[in-house]
Amino acid sequence: MDWSIFWDAFLSLVPPILVGGLFWIMMRSILRADRTERKVYSEIEAEMRAAQTASSNSATGVGSNTESK
């Protein structure tokens, strides 16, 4: 039995496997970065909304004791 046929077949599969692995690593890093960016953006947006709500409440007197006795 000639093992060179099997080695040739095995070695012909190595480049596509390596390229596929590289593609998988790149796509995983892109998706993780996108997920992290969305999380940070939503946290910043929530902080901005809370600050805007607090400033509008203090400007209108909502929630503060502005009544005179």
Image (spheres, rainbow, N blue to C red):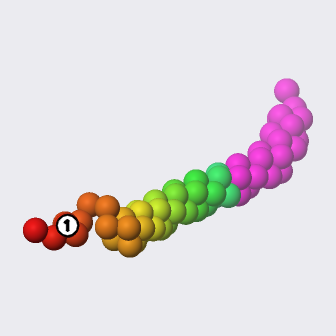
Q: Quadrant of residue 13?
A: top right
The residue depicted at 83 percent of the width and 34 percent of the height is: 6
Q: Is residue 66 above or below residue 32?
A: below
Provide residue 20's location: percent of width, then percent of height.
77, 47
The residue depicted at 26 percent of the width and 61 percent of the height is: 63
Front-most of 35 and 26?
35
Q: Is residue 67 above or below residue 6?
A: below
Q: Quadrant of residue 60?
A: bottom left
Front-most of 30 and 46?
46
For mark 1, give the secondary structure: loop
Q: Quadrant of residue 30?
A: bottom right
Q: Which residue range is magenta in the image?
A: 1-27
Report the label total. 1
Front-most of 26 and 62?
62
Front-most of 47 and 21?
47
The residue depicted at 23 percent of the width and 66 percent of the height is: 64
Name the side, left or right, on which 58 lies relative to 17.
left
What main secondary structure does the magenta stretch of the protein show?
helix
Q: Report which residue position mark 1 lands on.
A: 67
Q: Is residue 59 visible?
A: yes
Given the image, on which type of amino acid does mark 1 rest? Answer: Glu
Provide residue 10's location: percent of width, then percent of height.
81, 40
The residue depicted at 41 percent of the width and 63 percent of the height is: 53
Name the side, left or right, on which 28 lies relative to 61.
right
- Residue 13 among magenta residues: yes
Q: Is residue 5 above or below residue 40?
A: above
Q: Is residue 47 visible?
A: no
Which corner quadrant holds the N terminus? top right
Q: Residue furthest top?
A: 1
Provide residue 62's location: percent of width, then percent of height.
31, 61
